[in-house]
Image (cartoon, rainbow, N blue to C red):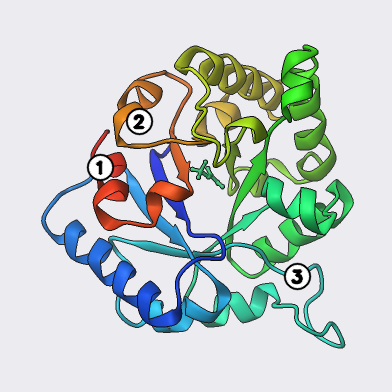
Amino acid sequence: MRKKIVAGNWKMNTTLAEGVGLAKDVNEALKHVTPKCDVVIAVPFTHLASIAAVIDSSKLGLGAENCADHVKGAYTGEVSAPMVASTGATYVILGHSERRQYYGETSETLKVKVGLALENALTPIFCIGEVLEERENGTYLDVVKKQIEEALFDLSAEDFGKIILAYEPVWAIGTGKTATDDQAEEMHAFIRSVIAKKYGDQVADDCSILYGGSCKPSNAAQLFAKPNVDGGLIGGASLEAESFMGIVNAF
Ligand code: PEP
């Protein structure tokens, strides 16, 4: 069964004390509601173990924002999938456009990271999305198809079934410019058709496809009402418990 999910991506924000405070606030808010979706926060590596210790993991999932493409060794500054898993985290964002754009992550690297995440029982939240130029020149569907095919289509159907996808048009991330619900639905339905062609209707139907890009309490309900939009990956609006919960409660 396809899951509805709202996941926060804190990016490089909050000190440890601020982050633990924010996680506690979200955790507390979740005690008073029964959300109609799974709720996850993806936080800086430095915060993972401390946050794992203060949240109720049955109500709030915890993830990293990246992991290394190696298991261990002489890779100064990197954090591996087993290290992430050892903190108690169970999710990892992979392929975020900021990682692709600023740190040169390619489909080849991401394929390795996805494999290591799965080997370490981490659920990848795998990001895909086109830049503005590709939206405007009409190649956006092909671009996203290629991102999925290159990084994920060597997986078995069983492993593919463990992945959460997040469609994040790069032109909508942190810009205040949200894709319309129809633009999101067009892409999500297309992604599902691409998955169906490769893995069959059941795998496609079961795959959660989140929307990300300036999603906020005021536009979440409209986006989430679309049949192929299964929730959101939330950047800026996840940095305050109230706005994040406003999105969680949009379901
Ligand atoms: C993101 O970076 O994953 C994101 C969706 O950011 P924002 O919500 O701030 O656009």
Residue that appears at 66% across and 35% down: 170
The image quadrant of residue 118 is bottom right
- In this rendering, would 240 be left or right of 40? left
Residue 137 seen anywhere in this rendered image of the structure = yes
- In this rendering, would 47 be left or right of 191? left
Q: Position of residue 101 (x, y in %)?
A: 78, 48
Chain-order first, disc 1 or disc 3? 3
Chain-order first, disc 2 or disc 1? 2
Label 1 Cα neighbours within 10 Å, binned few <14 / some 14-19 / many ≥20: some
Chain-order first, disc 3 or disc 2? 3
Q: CA distance from mark 3 to mark 2?
A: 32 Å
Q: Position of residue 180 (x, y in %)?
A: 49, 17
Residue that appears at 73% across and 66% down: 116
> Which residue is labeled 1 in the image?
246
Q: CA distance from mark 1 to mark 3?
A: 33 Å
Say if mark 1 contacts mark 3, CB within 8 Å. Answer: no
The image quadrant of residue 124 is bottom right
| Dot label at residue 220 | 2
